[in-house]
Image (cartoon, helix red, strand yellow):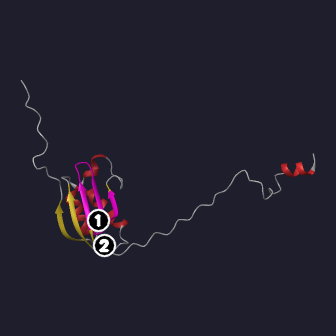
């Protein structure tokens, strides 16, 4: 073997500058720091309370979502998702997510017939958010769908 061949097979010597290494190590890209959110004293809170789940959304006065949470996100499963206790845990979770915004007062919009309506409202007060107004935006049919035909006996 010539000395050039020995140099190619030698694993103790570093590879020449032009040669590619077998394994390339990729450096992890650093995350950019979170953008500072504008401070706002007032906002909107949307509570959707269905028979099976409760979803709470915090938004600014323009309707841009600041944060949201639901019963499944905080770990409830099955019939426990629609309970008033789950609604209070949901509000606590989303309030923690958006605490850097500094929302102190809110207009509350509630939709749906579920049990989480009252629990979520009580939890808002417990988490230091003053409720300015409560509006029920549950959709109500104005005559609804056409009824099925009468049954023939």
Badge 1 vs badge 2, beta-carbon distance below 8 Å: no
Mark 2 = which residue? 103
**Most distant residue in the left direction:** 153
For the N terminus, which image quadrant?
top right
Which numbered marker is on residue 143? none
Task: Give the answer, above or below, for where 139 lies relative to 135.
Answer: above
**Most distant residue in the top direction:** 153
Identify the residue shown where x is 39% and y is 72%: 37
What is the crowding at mark 2: few (fewer than 14 residues within 10 Å), some, or many (at least 20)? many
Task: State which tag comes first along the sequence, 1 or 2.
Answer: 1
Residue 51: x, y in percent?
22, 49
| Mark nearer the viewer, 1 or 2 | 1
Which numbered marker is on residue 63? 1
What is the crowding at mark 1: few (fewer than 14 residues within 10 Å), some, or many (at least 20)? few
> Would residue 52 be counted in the magenta stretch?
yes
SS of the residue at dot 1? loop
Quadrant of res 60: bottom left
> Would residue 16 be counted in the magenta stretch?
no
Residue 29: x, y in percent?
58, 62
SS of the residue at dot 2? loop
Identify the residue shown where x is 88% and y is 48%: 5
The magenta region covers: 44-69
Task: Give the answer, above or below, for where 144 lies relative to 47.
Answer: above
Identify the residue shown where x is 29% and y is 75%: 41
66 on left or right of 19: left
Task: Give the answer, above or below, for where 10 lies relative to 149.
Answer: below
Identify the residue shown where x is 31% and y is 64%: 92
């Amino acid at each position: 073997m010539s000395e050039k061949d020995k140099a190619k097979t030698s694993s103790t010597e570093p590879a020449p500058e032009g040669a590619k290494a077998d394994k390339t190590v990729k450096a992890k890209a650093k995350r950019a720091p979170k953008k500072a959110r504008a401070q706002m004293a007032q906002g909107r809170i949307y509570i959707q309370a269905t028979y099976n789940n409760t979803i709470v959304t915090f938004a600014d006065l323009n309707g841009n979502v600041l944060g949201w949470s639901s019963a499944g996100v905080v770990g409830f499963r099955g019939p426990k998702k629609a309970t008033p206790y789950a609604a209070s845990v949901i509000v606590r979770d989303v309030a923690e997510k958006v605490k850097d915004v500094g929302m102190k007062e809110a207009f509350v919009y509630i939709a749906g017939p579920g049990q989480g309506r009252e629990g979520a409202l009580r939890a808002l007060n417990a988490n230091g958010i003053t409720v300015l107004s409560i509006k029920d935006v549950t959709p109500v049919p104005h005559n609804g769908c056409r009824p099925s035909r009468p049954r023939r006996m």
